[in-house]
């Protein structure tokens, strides 16, 4: 199929969205599909990294150098015009944002009768669940309209399936495709030799978005003894992004009295993350806040990466996590500092962790980039081929 992703991208691997899109669609292209993406870049080296990963795969980029805000409108028109002019059979048009999915109201007649449409459901896919009461009914009706406009629905977590069936009675044929992971790469992340006296390095990788509740990491560390330190690789890239992220970390270190116990690395490139950050960690962590997005709508990329390592994982016990990882794998906890600290302590001090990690690794094998692409390919072929 010729697959057009109607979503502008800022082409660098600093973004989890771009990271997952490039990985997912390159693997799909290797199964015979032709992919069309559009967006911008500002950093030459970061853009070359994208190109190196794509290699010879049939992934075509409509791209301009400069800020996305400057080029967004013109690139959108050019991308849509190329999709409209393409009258070859087997065309698929994919949206992954609520507002862009609503554009299908006027786009569908222009894209041709043979074109098929898929809506990728991500964290903001069901916005009525995140809105204040006055807006909920209207947003739910708009979501139902999106379902009618599309031929297929791609969910990205098993907890989304729960919400879909609770909230809606009619929707298009669906497939559930959680994130893919580089199994071999993350398997190289191993903990240091275990010693009861420590030290224990507690590691977090990711953004500081409010709904992820990263502050809980600092509050939990304050409840643990001095054997425990926190290593953080995250926040935003670039000089301004690093400064803002560092200020956030510094404020929390001062607030919780953690001077000398927090090692902030800033944003670390994915290609060196295992070697420079994950290796030597005693515990990996996945904090999240008690909200709808975290409980049901997200598909945490870092969950799948952590599952592929040899390091114990502490994660909040939400359906977005426990429906993926199952029982007796990660050390699950409630979304509060006391229980988060309890789980970190157990993960660090439990000598017999091998069986848990083996079960976690076995589950991770189901979520490789290759397996995800193969499932998507079969579904597209069997369900949406013209």
Image (tube, helix red, strand yellow):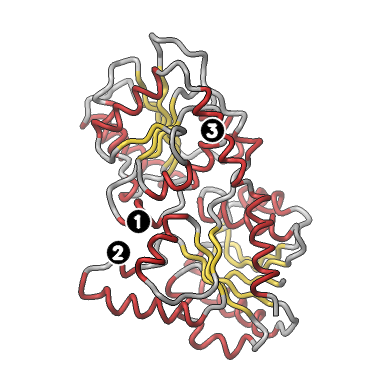
The N terminus, quarter of image = bottom right
Asked if the residues shown at circle 3 and circle 1 are in contact, with their CB atoms under 8 angstroms apart, the answer is: no
Mark 1 and mark 2 in contact? Answer it, CB < 8 Å: yes
- Determine which residue is flagged by label 1: 293
**Secondary structure of residue under mark 3:** helix
Dot label at residue 329: none
Residue depicted at x 47% and y 40%: 267
Q: Nearer the viewer, residue 196 or 267?
A: 196
Other residues around mark 1 within 10 Å, as few (<14) / some (14–19) / many (≥20)? many
Counting other residues with Cα less than 10 Å from the Cα at mark 2, is it few (<14), some (14-19), or many (20 or more)? some
The answer to which quarter of the image holds residue 243 is top left
Foreground pick, 71 / 87: 87
Residue toward you, 330 or 243:
330
Position of residue 241 relative to residue 356, above or below, is below
- Residue 132 vertical placement versus 116 (above, below): above
Number of numbered discs overlaid on the protein picture: 3
Residue at x-position 40% and y-position 26%: 202
Sequence-wise first label, 3 or 2: 2
Q: Quadrant of residue 175?
A: bottom right
Q: Residue furthest bottom?
A: 109
Give the percent coordinates (x, y) of residue 95: 53, 71
Residue occupying image coordinates x 25% and y 25%: 222
Name the secondary structure under disc 2: loop
For the residues labelled 3 and 2, say whether their Cβ atoms are less than 8 Å apart: no
Q: Which label sits on residue 359?
A: 3
Q: CA distance from mark 3 to mark 1?
A: 27 Å
Distance in Å between CA atoms under marks 3 and 2: 34 Å
Q: Secondary structure at mark 1?
A: helix
The image shows residue 275 at horizontal and vertical percentages of 58, 29
- From the image, tell me which residue sits under label 2: 130
User: Where is 80 relative to 24, above or below?
Assistant: below
């Amino acid at each position: 199929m010729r697959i057009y992703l109607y979503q502008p991208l800022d082409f660098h691997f600093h973004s989890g969205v771009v990271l997952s899109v490039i990985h997912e669609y390159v693997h799909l292209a290797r199964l015979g599909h032709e992919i069309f993406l559009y967006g911008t870049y500002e950093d030459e080296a970061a853009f070359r990294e994208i190109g190196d990963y794509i290699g010879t795969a049939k992934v075509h980029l409509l791209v301009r150098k400069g800020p996305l805000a400057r080029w967004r409108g013109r690139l959108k028109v050019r991308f849509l015009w190329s999709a409209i002019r393409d009258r070859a059979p087997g065309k698929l048009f994919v949206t992954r944002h609520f507002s862009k999915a609503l554009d299908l109201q006027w786009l569908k007649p222009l894209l041709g009768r043979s074109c098929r449409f898929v809506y990728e459901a991500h964290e903001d896919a069901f916005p009525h669940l995140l809105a204040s009461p006055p807006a909920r009914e209207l947003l739910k009706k708009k979501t139902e309209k999106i379902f009618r406009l599309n031929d297929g629905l791609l969910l990205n977590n098993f907890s989304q399936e729960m919400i879909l069936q609770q909230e809606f009675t009619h929707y298009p044929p669906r497939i559930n495709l959680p994130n893919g992971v580089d199994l071999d790469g993350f398997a190289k992340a191993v903990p240091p030799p275990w010693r009861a006296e420590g030290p224990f390095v507690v590691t977090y990788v990711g953004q500081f978005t409010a709904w992820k509740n990263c502050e809980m990491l600092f509050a939990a560390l304050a409840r643990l003894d001095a054997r425990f330190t926190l290593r953080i690789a995250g926040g935003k890239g670039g000089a301004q992004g690093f400064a803002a992220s560092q200020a956030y970390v510094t404020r929390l270190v001062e607030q919780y009295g953690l001077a000398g116990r927090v090692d902030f690395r800033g944003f670390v490139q994915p290609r060196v993350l295992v070697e420079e950050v994950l290796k030597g960690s005693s515990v990996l962590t996945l904090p999240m806040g008690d909200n709808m997005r975290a409980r049901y709508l997200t598909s945490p990329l870092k969950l799948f990466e952590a599952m592929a390592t040899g390091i114990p994982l502490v994660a909040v016990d939400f359906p977005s996590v426990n429906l993926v990882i199952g029982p007796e794998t990660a050390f699950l906890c409630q979304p509060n500092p006391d229980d988060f600290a309890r789980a970190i302590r157990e993960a660090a001090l439990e000598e017999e962790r091998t069986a848990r990690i083996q079960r976690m690794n076995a589950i991770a094998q189901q979520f490789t980039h290759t397996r995800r692409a193969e499932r998507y390919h079969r579904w597209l072929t069997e369900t949406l081929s013209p």
